[in-house]
Amino acid sequence: MVMKEDNIVKQKSFDFAVRIIKLYQYLSSDKKEFVLSKQILRSGTSVGAMIRESEHAQKEINETIYWLELFQATDYLSVQEFESMNEDAVEIIKLITSIIKTTKNNINN
């Protein structure tokens, strides 16, 4: 399923959620990791939903980065796998931050 590309942050967060789901499937089936993988599944997939709700997405994407760092530090993810996922997450943070700043500037003007 592909969303309309009228909103880049919605599309990127949706694509990120798809990657998180695939990561969860890999961690649970190949690595037999079930507890932490459910946590990253929850936080990583809620980013897109929260973007639609508001700025709570910034908190969730930061939490997801924490879980990615934890998986990399405990060898569930290789450095390359971590860097690939982290790069997407950081890009989403930058987009969300930009949107929040623009919105606040528009409200104050």
Image (spheres, rainbow, N blue to C red):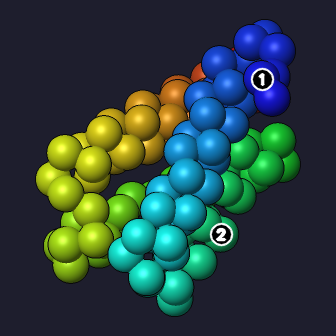
Of 27 and 79, nearer the camera is 27
In what element is the residue under mark 1? loop
Sequence-first disc among 1 and 2: 1
Residue 66 falls left or right of residue 13: left
How many numbered dots are placed on residues in this image? 2
Q: Which mark is residue 33?
A: none
Residue 65's image quarter?
Answer: bottom left
Of 74 and 22, nearer the camera is 22
Residue extending farthest top: 6
Please give the residue where the numbered disc 2 appears in the rendered image: 42
Figure quadrant of the C terminus: top right
Counting from the top left corner in percent of width and height, residue 1 is at 81, 29
State the residue at coordinates (52%, 85%).
34
Counting from the top left corner in percent of width and height, residue 80 is at 19, 45
Residue extending farthest front: 30
State the residue at coordinates (47%, 62%).
26
8 relative to 1, above or below: above
108 relative to 63, above or below: above
Residue 64 falls left or right of residue 50: left
In the rendered structure, which amino acid carries the disc numbered 1? Val
Of 1 and 84, nearer the camera is 1
Q: How packed is label 1: few (under 14 Cα within 10 Å), some, or many (20 or more)?
A: few
Of 67 and 26, nearer the camera is 26
